[in-house]
Image: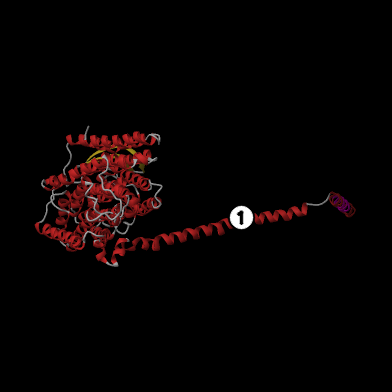
Amino acid sequence: MSPVAWALALPVVPAIAALAGFLVPSAARRTAAGVGIAGAAAAGVVLFLQLGQEIPELPDTASSTLDGPVLVRFGDVAVTLSAGVSQLTWWVAAIVVLVALLVQVYSVGYLLKGDERYAPYAAQISLFTSAMLLVVVADDLILLLIGWEVMGACSYLLIGHDRKLPEAPGAAVKAFLVTRVGDVGFLLGILVLGFHAGGFRYGDIAAFMSESTGTTIFTVTALLIMLGAIGKSAQFPLQTWLPDAMAGPTPISALIHAATMVAAGAYVLVRLSDLLVKGDVRIVLGVIAMISMVLSALAALASDDLKRVLAWSTVSQVAYMMAAVSVGATATAIFHLVSHGLFKALLFLGAGAVIHMAKTNSMERMGGLRKGAPVTFWSMTIGFAALVGLPPLSGFFSKEHVLSGIYDTRGQTVLFVVGLVTALLTAAYATRAWLRTFFGETRTEGLSAHDPGAWMLWPLVVLAVPTVGFGLFAGLTPLLHGKTHPTAMGLTMTAVAAGIGLSFGIWRGDKAADPARALGPLQRVFARGFYLDEVQNALVVRPVYFLSRLARRIDVSVVDGAAEGTGRGIGGLGRLVAIGHRAGIPRQVVSVLAGALLIGAAAVVMGVWG
């Protein structure tokens, strides 16, 4: 089989596992787990077999394409079952498959024993994986859109999986609705671009851009597609759904935040980077990236919930990817996407192990957990070090590539400075979380630190290895055609050292020494994400509620009132007519006889005069 045929098989394999999983009875939880693990493992085998094929190299985002049958035709514009493959798609698919497989394994230890709804949960993960892989390999934007929307539906189901958790349903609805705001723009952008290009394949769009001299259509469609991307990737101003999504099970947080849904927006913008250039909108993306970086890093610095710290961190790290795209460093953006997928999945799964033993998300009630949980401690230490960007871990090389790419781009001084500030803040909040979780005295009486069972432990070990190894492999080879600039590296490492020093300087190992307390009254502002939820409630939610209530009142009072009033009027008229027809039999006989006499008299008179 050709590489593109294997690529087309990638989303099909977990889709089959999802279908089989939905048919498994709810009581057969182990069977459902086996089907989910087998589906992800089979996708991994398909991916491995691609290594024997010739795959186009990065940074070229063009791909070998397999044109399948026409799915639907809109006049002269056809939607085809087309798959594309390149090193870009292979690396992104690899991280998706790896994280999905480890999440399926981890979930067995985390949820299977006490979760009566585990069977549909495992099937939903398989469907979610299939949808993301379809986004990765699709060469037709409508086909990509199908995977994009299925992913959104699955995220709603998975975030709201724990029905015993009061905030889970609201978080699921919020994630669904906020991302739908962006998806409206995404859909419109794809349709307008595709119909103007005469097709929805990447090749059709590239040909249209090369032949067209105007920019208006490209500016409009680029902005619309960018709206969808920032919604999915939780970038400003549509980032508010992501921290609340922590109400979902921790394995789902690892899946959504590390390698799939949140990374999808950055991936699509990489594939359509030429459109951003043609539409001259990269500066808009750069501004969004800068705001998202700093805002979310400050929120992470002030948060007490361990999972929310990691969630805000995801917003910030994806902003690095967006910044790289904004300066044309697309291969570097993918490098950081893959690197981030590894260490963030490691951190989320490690956080799940910590929460499992501490019975709380609050770092205020943790502390001293390294003593009885060495594997969890060292795994998360590697993850935090990669997040900070310490050598020789994957996060060091990928972040240095991003910042060096920005540094080497003329006119991007502000973006580079913001990137350095974010590196400092990242080092500060990661060090704070590490210290508050694992060091000092335990702040909860009776808390016993221990590593989780094998089902949860081995995924941590497996992810720790490539978090170290991938950085060395990708950083020391020309794989991604990137480079680090000595000046940029020196400035970045200085910022990282300053951030680590700040947290260590304030921390003293007791409850009162939380480094975030140095923020004073700003801590609450930062922890609440600068009250952007409240702003959205005031500007969007409340007006929508008001309009919906007004529409309901108009419907009840005017529309229904008019219909019901007409019915009542006709009924009253009918009753009046009925009254005229109701009379006793004697009166009716007299009336009939009187009428007959009148008619007879009239006939006689007319006969005489006639």
Q: Residue farthest to the left?
A: 486
Q: Does the magenta stretch include residue 458?
A: no
Which residue is nearer to you in this view: 235 or 228? 235
Compared to residue 316, the image places residue 134 above or below, namely above
Quadrant of image for the N terminus: top left
Instruction: Give the residue type at disc 1.
Output: Glu
Place residue 490 in its image quadrant: bottom left
Q: Mark 1 points at which residue?
A: 564
Compared to residue 50, the image places residue 247 above or below, namely below
Q: Residue farthest to the bottom?
A: 521
Give percent across and percent down for residue 427. Answer: 19, 57
Q: Residue farthest to the top?
A: 1
Compared to residue 17, the image places residue 522 above or below, namely below
Which residue is nearer to you in this view: 210 or 106? 106
**Residue neighbourhood size for the residue with mark 1, other residues' Cα within 10 Å, grouped as few (<14), some (14–19), many (≥20):** few
Circle 1 sits in a helix, a strand or a loop, which is it? helix
Give percent across and percent down for residue 146. Answer: 34, 44
Magenta segment boundaries in residue numbering: 592-601
Q: In this view, does 333 lie to the left or right of 574?
A: left
Give percent across and percent down for residue 213. Answer: 24, 55
